[in-house]
Amino acid sequence: MNTRPRRNRKSAAIRSMVEETKIGTEHLIYPIFLKDGKGVKEEISSLPKNYRWSIDQLLPEIEACMKLGIFTYDIFPAVEEHLKDRVASYSYAEDNFYLNAFRKLKETFPEIVLMSDVALDPYSSDGHDGLVENGQILNDETLPILNRMAVAQAQSGVDIIGPSDMMDGRVGSIREALDINGYTDVSIMSYSAKYASAFYGPFRDALNSAPKSGDKKTYQMNPANKREALLEAELDYLEGADMLMVKPALCYLDVIHMLKENFNIPITAYNVSGECAMVYAATEKGWLNYDLAISEMLLSMRRAGADAILTYFAKDFATLLKNK
Ligand code: PBG
């Protein structure tokens, strides 16, 4: 045998020297849930270790995460049912708890990168990402609402807009609305290949945002389709997206890899709530080693080609890296 691959694995130092994939806290984006009020820190039952925070409680938490090296946060507001309506008007309303919280965050920590979702569902009485009429999700009628939401978020200091709605033409529409209003520096990380997945359950629990009727299959992608992700990514790229996201991550590593091979802008992966919940549950039962499992999962997303990863494991993983 003149080729023995084990020689390159014979010590920790050699293994580290020939390691192909690196992952650090700079690759992490931390999704966090926000709630109106004061002194609120409510654990999400289907997503343990994750909370709905009021802004006063969240500020020290962000400070702690920054000390661990996490600088990018995707903040999702949990909106009271009585504030939801058909057209998701709370998403851009004046004197609005979540936009005020965004302002406070950026004022307190100007160095963070603040990301926010654009889609109707957390603000919609129908629980859909687009406008609903007679059971149909209207595409073109949804776009002006998305534009308004994106501009309101940009006004409150958001650095990256994340359109997660999967309406056709939304990236171009939002890009134009941002530019007309002077927000040419605000980025768009498009949820390009967003699949109609079983793994969003805990997120919908956190925001109480599940669809009131039907499912999301007329706008989110069919999990069976791969080539279609190229079409979605190409449209978003041509419409002006700065980064392309694949969501979920674990079941779609092939899609991450394909987009990385085909596009010269950053590719991101959303390690969604259900993927994290599985690990929390198995760890609680003593069936998995949490630290090893999350490290391997996040590494696999980077290996597939993700430049950055949105993950609920961000704080725990950053803590692990720090103590390594
Ligand atoms: C809203 C949105 C969802 C997620 C991110 N943005 C839910 C959905 O589309 O139903 C899911 C994130 C997660 O599960 O962690 N459109």
Image (spheres, rainbow, N blue to C red):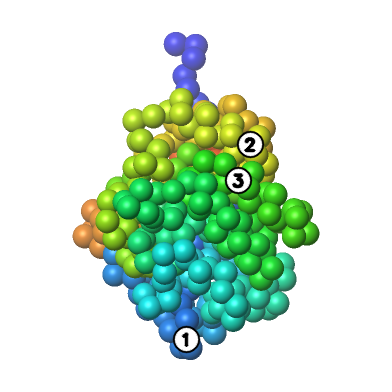
Q: Amino acid at mark 3?
A: Val
Q: Who's the residue at 50% across and 53% down the image?
A: 142
Q: Are the residues tagged 3 and 1 within 8 Å (C-beta)?
A: no
Q: Is residue 194 left or right of residue 55?
A: left
Quarter placement of the N terminus: top left
The mark lying in front, picked from 3 and 1, is 3
Q: Amino acid at mark 2?
A: Tyr
Q: Residues within 10 Å of mark 1 (few under 14, many from 20)?
A: few
Q: Position of residue 166 (x, y in %)?
A: 48, 45
Task: Decide: is 64 above or below 313.
Answer: below
Q: Position of residue 189 (x, y in %)?
A: 60, 49
Q: Is residue 172 left or right of residue 57?
A: right
Q: Is residue 317 left or right of residue 221?
A: right
Q: In terms of depth relative to the viewer, which is nearer, 290 or 275?
A: 275
Task: Decide: is 113 above or below 308.
Answer: below
**Cα gap from disc 1 to disc 2, whole angstroms:** 39 Å
Q: In terms of depth relative to the viewer, which is nearer, 44 or 200?
A: 200
**Cα gap from disc 3 to disc 2, whole angstroms:** 9 Å
Q: Residues within 10 Å of mark 3 (few under 14, many from 20)?
A: many
User: On residue 37, which mark appears?
Assistant: 1
User: On residue 237, which mark appears?
Assistant: 2
Q: In terms of depth relative to the viewer, which is nearer, 234 or 313?
A: 234
Counting residues from the start of the chain, the first of labels 3 and 2 encountered is: 3
Q: Is residue 105 left or right of residue 77?
A: right
Q: Who's the residue at 68% across and 54% down the image?
A: 177
